[in-house]
Amino acid sequence: MIEFFQVLVSGIMLGGIYSLISIGLTLIFGIMRILNFAHGEYLMIAMYLSFWLFKLLNIDPYVSIIIVVPALFLLGIISQKLVIKPIINAPPTMQIFATVGLSLVFQNLALFLWKADYRTVKTSYQTATIHLGPMLVSFPRMVAFLIAIIVSLGFFYFLKNTYTGKALRSIAQNREAAMLMGIDVSKMYMIAFALGTACVGVAGALLMPVYYVFPTVGTYFGVTAFVVVVLGGMGNMTGAFLGGLLIGVIESISGVYIDPSLKEAVYFIIFILVLLFKPSGLFGLRGAEEVGLK
Amino acid sequence: MKKILVYLVVFALISTFAVGCSSGGGGGAEKESKPEVVKIGVLFPFSGSMAALGEENFRGAEIARLVRNKQGGLWGKQIEFVKADAPDATAAVAEADRLINKEGMKVIIGSYSSSLSYAASEVAERNGVIYWEVGGISDPITSRGYKYLFRTVPTGSSFGIQAVKFAKAIAPDIGVKPEEMKIAIVHEDSMYGTTVGENAKAEAERQGLDLVEMVAYSAKTNDLSSVILKLKAANPDVLIATSYITDTILFWRQARELNFYVKAAIGTGAGYAMRDFAEAVGDDVNRIFNVDFPQLDTNPEFAKGIDEFKKLYEETFGEPPKSGHSLVAYAGALILWDVMEKAGSMDPEAIRKAALEVDIPDGETAVGFGCKFAGPDAENAGQNIKAYPLVAQWKNQKLVTVWPEEAAAGEIELPMKPWE
């Protein structure tokens, strides 16, 4: 029984990281209706940024959040202006090509600039563990999990209670009507995209003490993020958060009780079942895949 | 703003074309004015997740090329490499095809990863082109009866077997009787990990050791807690592990987090051999063993020419070698030059014949072990039957060769220290 709870806890901690990455992706999709295939690469860039800040300026990865997040926000604005804006009204296939292209550019740029080495940071706390009764929880994973919760709550508050948040939601619900109400749609898009990338900025800095960065690290998390987003209901923030935790737990449990080499297969099967029987996602309202952010 | 962008794109396109044309044209002109170049294809993963070790493997071949060119090259001609980047098996097939049918290569050196080698060598065999493997260790590569395929490095099965033999040898050091020793095997589930894992399992059964757990997982995973919890439940004395670099780092970080302890841990190459591993986990790396290609500290009495190699590597790349992968590729490529010199031409048939006549005794190469290829009728056709892996141990974050004795540069230290 203790073993089961240990597995559960490990899964939830892993899921926290998935959630954090997926929230940014679902935000961008919900508001802009753009499938951002370069999402994982923004994570990679955030991780590299955090790594270099540690390596060159000796800034702790957690402290680096205050630099990485604005930097990723800025990068989001630039990418939105240069790549996303021209294709915002293009057919979805074209948008997919553009973001996949963007991801390849980022990957190879990273390979060119920083080589294929696996970069890690060494901090005093990275393998520290917290004892929760008989269970062991990794300290940096716990931090990542807690911050994932804080960031999600922050986002909910922001979307519900601020003017910008309400404007963003109105665009998600009806782009034309929002425009008629005098909302600057293109500015809101910029904010949405930048917020999405800023979100992986947080995730990147939090991942650095636990994980390692290399040019294609984004694909490892990118695919999972897409599964989470679809599972939680596309554009649904609560769904992304809970979906992330769910995938983490599924991965952990199937790894121990079925077979570690089959754990991806297990959650992809669940993913396919969801697509077949509830295409709006586990937490999405019927038709949410069409309408977006609720 | 938009205008500038358009100009930029146009400029980029034009410059790409210009570069493409000039290099194409240049190649042609070179052929006419300087016919004294020997061109050899090199196929490695230069990009993608295997790029780090692929590049390291390639660097060994590159140094062998420079050394040979300094000595006058092949048949008085300088050797030149035509590079092909193969991040995955599909690309390996396409690139091997390009090297052979477009670039006209008669000899290809590859390819670090077994999966790439397996796919690319098939193309080479079909076209009657020599495939000289200096990195990939998986057994099936040389179990297909290929005529034009040669492999200078030991096979994956010998890694697994060597790991188990070594485990048995250190039983007294960790205070258990060999027949009571509990062994667990963990491996990533691509061709490489599976070959090593299965052979370790078979050898453990032959030796009568107690195999308590065997776990496979995908190296692409980003969480190994489930693997570790499984192993922790089995509570082995010795762990035999096969993994690439990402999963090796992840495994040991999470092993510490979840307080998984074994008395001896024996890795079998790849991730366990890399400096990146030591940098990532720090002192936790100490006392972990690694069954692998000969390492850079192998006793120079046993591995002749190893010191020259290290010097050349530093001079060429401005940093010390990252792992033994470059060393084995270096030694392997040097053998190829000798074979080609003897063959007297680029004719694959002649090269093949010369390769089969090679018989280098142990202690004559930079890797220590000698070279003799199994004939085309043997079940491991093209395999260097004199190749075997050595065992090294991480000490002060450096790999020190410890077993077998004639190659050793240091003493075995056991057992592992428990996590504080």
Image (cartoon, rainbow, N blue to C red):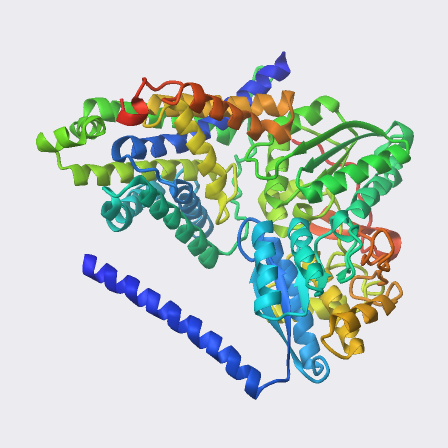
Residue B47 picture location, percent across and down: 53, 55
Q: Which residue in the rendered view is the most extreme toward the top?
A: A1
> In which quadrant of the rendered view does residue B145 lie?
bottom right
Q: Nearer the viewer, residue B282 or A90?
A: A90
Side of B210 relative to B275 (left or right): right
Quadrant location, the C terminus of chain B = top right
Report the number of discs: 0
Q: Nearer the viewer, residue B17 or B185?
A: B17
Q: Is residue A77 visible?
A: yes
Q: Nearer the viewer, residue A85 or A205?
A: A85
Quadrant location, the N terminus of chain B = bottom left
Is B19 rendered above or below residue A101? below
> In which quadrant of the rendered view does residue B253 lie?
top right
Is B346 rendered above or below residue B76? above
Residue under the image location 25 percent in, 43 percent down: A90
Q: Nearer the viewer, residue B300 or B166?
A: B166
Q: Which residue in the rendered view is the most extreme toward the front?
A: B126
Residue B216 picture location, percent across and down: 68, 33
Residue B361 picture location, percent across and down: 89, 65
Side of B61 relative to A175 (left or right): right
Residue under the image location 48 percent in, 55 percent down: A111
Residue under the image location 46 percent in, 36 percent down: A223
Q: Is residue A292 visible?
A: no
Residue B64 picture location, percent across and down: 69, 70
Is A266 rendered above or below residue B358? above
Side of A126 relative to B20 (left or right): right
Residue under the image location 79 percent in, 50 percent down: B143
